[in-house]
Amino acid sequence: MADAEQIEQVTKQVQDVVLDEHGKPLSKSALKKLEKEKLKKERAEKDALARKAQEEAKAANTPDCSKGLYGKKPMNRSEDRPGLKHEKLPDITASRAGDKVWIRARVQTCRPTGGNMCFFVLRQNSSTIQGLVVCDKETISKQMVKFAQGISTESIVLLEGTVAVPKEPVTGCTVQDAEIAISQLFVTGEAQGRLPFNLADASRPETDFEKEDAQFSKVSLHTRLENRVFDLRTITNQSIFRIQAGVCKLFREFLEKKGFMEIHTPKIIGAATEGGANVFKVKYFDTDAFLAQSPQFYKQMVVCGDFERVFEIGSVFRAENSFTHRHMTEFIGLDLEMAFEEHYHEILDVFDELFVHIFTGLETEYAADLEVVHRQYPFEKFQFLPKTLRLEYKDAVALLRENGVEMGDYDDLSTEIEKKLGQLVKAKYHTDFFMLDKFPLEVRPFYTMPDPKNPKYSNSYDFFMRGEEILSGAQRIHDPDFLIERAKAHDVDPESIKNYVDAFRMGAPPHGGGGIGLERVIFFYLNLGNIRRVSLFPRDPNRLTP
Amino acid sequence: MADAEQIEQVTKQVQDVVLDEHGKPLSKSALKKLEKEKLKKERAEKDALARKAQEEAKAANTPDCSKGLYGKKPMNRSEDRPGLKHEKLPDITASRAGDKVWIRARVQTCRPTGGNMCFFVLRQNSSTIQGLVVCDKETISKQMVKFAQGISTESIVLLEGTVAVPKEPVTGCTVQDAEIAISQLFVTGEAQGRLPFNLADASRPETDFEKEDAQFSKVSLHTRLENRVFDLRTITNQSIFRIQAGVCKLFREFLEKKGFMEIHTPKIIGAATEGGANVFKVKYFDTDAFLAQSPQFYKQMVVCGDFERVFEIGSVFRAENSFTHRHMTEFIGLDLEMAFEEHYHEILDVFDELFVHIFTGLETEYAADLEVVHRQYPFEKFQFLPKTLRLEYKDAVALLRENGVEMGDYDDLSTEIEKKLGQLVKAKYHTDFFMLDKFPLEVRPFYTMPDPKNPKYSNSYDFFMRGEEILSGAQRIHDPDFLIERAKAHDVDPESIKNYVDAFRMGAPPHGGGGIGLERVIFFYLNLGNIRRVSLFPRDPNRLTP
């Protein structure tokens, strides 16, 4: 709840309606320009104020009763270690009224009130508190107040103050029952120059932009990504990446309990084993190498090396020249591979429990972060079943046909049809997550085990969240001779996959697995519209920086 | 202890002394050749036996009382799922005598005894049990015994049997108080052709090869790596990679408790930011990109994005054309970065506790695995202090000089001098792990914060295990103008690191961190002689496969 209130506070900022000379709201670009000028002016004014204060003090030779209690600190080079305890904002409450505390925080807003006061909203990650400097002419001088008024937004300050209980709750901050009466104030990390955009705009609920009287600029995804370090400071992004770390944690903790071992396979590989089309080439000393498009072959080899259940969290590279909402050239794969005893559905059983564990864990352990994201990017609650729906491909085709989609029995699914299927499944089974089993053999890679009962199908599956694919997997062929036969049928040169095939010659258990796209899971769970929002520094054919 | 006994059993195999025609022990290569021939002969004999059995049965038209109870199963294509419970070997004990059980395991050894019996050592990962097939002419036919005798080593079998208590403990297996009287026996994954080397030799204690009467072949690291999938099956390798997974787990669990968040930074980067020399170039659509030599710049940027404490476990790439025992072109970095409050020694405090947590966790949670590795590769117990020794560079130089090493105050340490220092520190402080703080500024990268008290030194550190470097880190410069000044002093073009420098313009906290080489930690902890032993599929300038 605290987080939600903070968003509200952020949202309230910069809501003044700006009109042009004809009394009409300004265009976006004009607004932006205006805002730029405004900021520039403000900065100049603040600088002037600070200079003036110093000059005044000097000129008048006024004694400064706050001397040494404020100022800009030189760069911290670890000169000393006085051992001051720095407080975390969530630990400050009304019960501590009267306590002297030291706090390091960012200046989220700095609001001068006349010449004698300055209000701050101070931020640490997702928490905020109100701070104030009031001139009392005994310990807090006019000069100190002027210095405070000149501090630029997003600067980091170190301050000493006394916890006080405000007359009314500070609704604009996450800490509402306490504020800080500042007695010492130092800038330790100054924000220089113009900020790339308004952080309040970058945190504003999407729905605000649809309002008729919306007068603020929407920060485009491009602008965000160009200024990603700054963009990451919005409370929404703080939450998104905490959720991402959470998915990894939930993934690992479940699999470790189930006897899976973490592995790390090479990303630089000698041959473009999985097909040369979408693979990045690396100059490797005097020869060429490639970036792994998935850890699959190596995972399988490790299983044949008697590590029967393995998982990996690692980088995956795809040289796809595409600019869709769900493709990146580099992402994180959550991979697992396991030997099974009788039937590849044992793998689906593991995945089933795994995803239920992740979805449940998000709802329970990350509820506050989900709420924060929801406020900016409203999404329908993600629905899932305690036992995941498993749909056979042929039944999915039937369902699609019943609903007017024309397609052949063994046609692959287009993105559009996948989405349609997601809607139909949601309507019929009330779930945003399901497994699609028994894909047509022809649309799957050569190493996929054919269905023993119908040679047109295979023991392979995709998983979907909100109608979009987040995992692909299969029972793999573990018989080397059959594998070669299937490779040839797919025009794959057996010589090019020799190491892989040889791994099965010394006795291989039946096995299979799958790879989950980490960013996709979060992207679709939160329904964020673009996968780039859930990557710290996304990569696509046009984006290599920052 | 069970594991230790298994090694003993493995060790006992293949110990016959082979002499040449002059009564002298054969040379290594002659031995190898002999062994090859022997294996070939054995295989041929086994095949002949199996064929003969079939022919005999056919010819005599002898009814086979075991019909349907043995044979080679067709490839598992997930035809059905009968739901048989497969037992794990450690769960089988004398207390279960009389129980009928199903087991899937590898045939580690297959020893025919006359025409009526066959003994197996069956293996699952690091566990082994004895199994036997005995002809009783009622349910177990001569034909079935002959089939059993023909099964090739390392094949996977699925068997039904009755738990029995052997007259004497089976000292050669990890399960000693129980054995399996086999009643059904199926080969489900046949090992084809010749195995690349003898698994017993590959598991043999290093010390065995120093014995005067040693008559077996040592499996070279090259041979192991060329046949890595097979090599991974040795119990020593099973333990090494469990230990590796353990280090990652201990690293994460400690940092999560300390408020660190897991991140994933891009591995494909737009500029060779950390110096172009050792960087791999990638063809990125119509332009060039590079593989990240470390996540450092991105970690720092994330810290500036207000994620104040972050860690990453990910691939790191170094195009170093070197073939030392401790370099690979690709390895796993355990990285962390944190904002600190007053002094960069706060980072050392975190690292200190972290390493003590890892070393202690290995000793307690991975004791059995350590024992297994120790049997094959004996190592001195790794010594560490409850509070890690922190040595200043100048004091290390003094210590070296006292002991006859000639070097200047600000010279870098060569690998050789590092090792010497490790020995001196061990002798004086009784620890294999220490931190070396305050490196000369000149030998560190441009972004390193200079020491405020002596401009010749810096706020940077390396950590050492058994006298070899496993971590490098520092307080980073967080002031953009000073960073540019230092970059210029190092001939780094500020334009080439613009994104990085800009991250500090919007207010940056003092911060620092370091990167641990995962493989190095395990390599030096276990003192394994070559880092390639602790990488599943190591990469060096000559090795891109498997």
Image (cartoon, coloured by chain):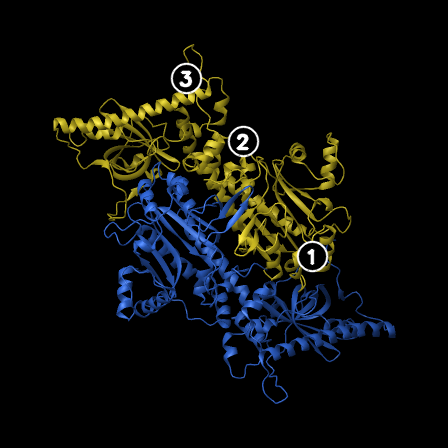
Chain colours: A blue, B yellow
Pointer 1 chain: B
Q: How many marks?
A: 3
Pointer 2 chain: B
Circle 1 Cα neighbour tier, 10 Å, few/some/many (<14 / 14–19 / ≥20):
some
Q: Are marks 3 and 1 in contact (CB under 8 Å)?
A: no
Please indicate, yes or no, whether residue A307 appears anywhere in the rendered image.
no
Q: Which residue is the site of mark 3?
A: B17
Q: Would you say B429 lies left or right of A209 here?
A: right
Q: Give the residue type that dot 3 points to.
A: Val
Q: Which residue is the site of mark 1?
A: B494
Q: Give the residue type that dot 2 points to.
A: Phe
Say whether disc 3 or disc 1 marks the residue closer to the N-terminus: 3
Displayed quadrant of residue A136: bottom right
Q: Helix, strand or loop at disc 3? A: loop
Pointer 3 chain: B
Where B358 falls versus A371 (above or below)? above
Q: Are marks 2 and 1 in contact (CB under 8 Å)?
A: no
Q: Which residue is the site of mark 2?
A: B379
